[in-house]
Amino acid sequence: MDLNIDLNNKNNNKDVKLSVDFLVPFTNTLVNLLSKANLSSWEFKRELNNIKITNIVDKDIQIESNSVVFNFKVYILYSGTRNFILKIEGRSEFTGFCIMVTNKGMAVNDDVAINSLPLAKDLKKQFLMNYKSPYLLTETYLTFLNSD
């Protein structure tokens, strides 16, 4: 794995932009879903399936999922409205990038892996610049939702 990635490389910038275009609406959709009041377990799982979250395990009063979506590891632990953990971790060229969301707030990091890659820092910067209201539905995200 090449640790000396050229951040001025057009392909790297394109990868970051594409990932941000996906992550901003995806993260917002998940946070809104996890915060939604009066949602039945069945409705919650259906909504997760709509955004391609798989490997859903329902045990007692908790719903848990560990999936790979758009080359990001997505972990969800849901115990009811406003009682959740959401973790989105970068893979491949974004190793080290991580979004952690709970009912208490959000933390975005670029150095959570032993060998964090340089694009993780760029992804963090661009994500934080774009994660603000209103959350636009990007072409990248809409294409993702409509794919099989």
Image (spheres, rainbow, N blue to C red):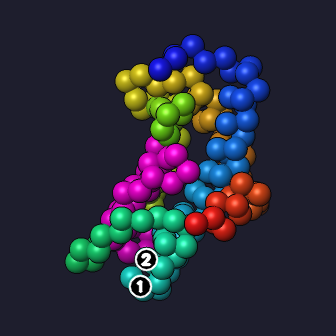
- Quadrant where the image shows the C terminus: bottom right
* Residue 95, horizontal then vertical, whole percent: 48, 32
Residue type for callout 2: Lys
Disc 1, SS: helix
Kindly report the distance in space between the C-alpha atoms of the residues bearing marks 2 and 1. 5 Å
Residue at the disc numbered 2: 45
* Res 60 → quadrant: bottom left
Residue at the disc numbered 1: 42
Q: Specify start and end residues of the magenta stretch as a single range.
A: 63-89
Depth check: 72 or 64 in front? 72
State the residue lying farthest toward the top: 4
Depth check: 21 or 2 in front? 2
Can residue 84 be seen in this snapshot? no
Image point 37% across, 24% down: which residue? 114
* Residue 55, horizontal then vertical, whole percent: 36, 65
Relative height, residue 86 to residue 126 (above, below): below
Image point 62% across, 35% down: which residue? 123
Image point 24% across, 74% down: which residue? 59
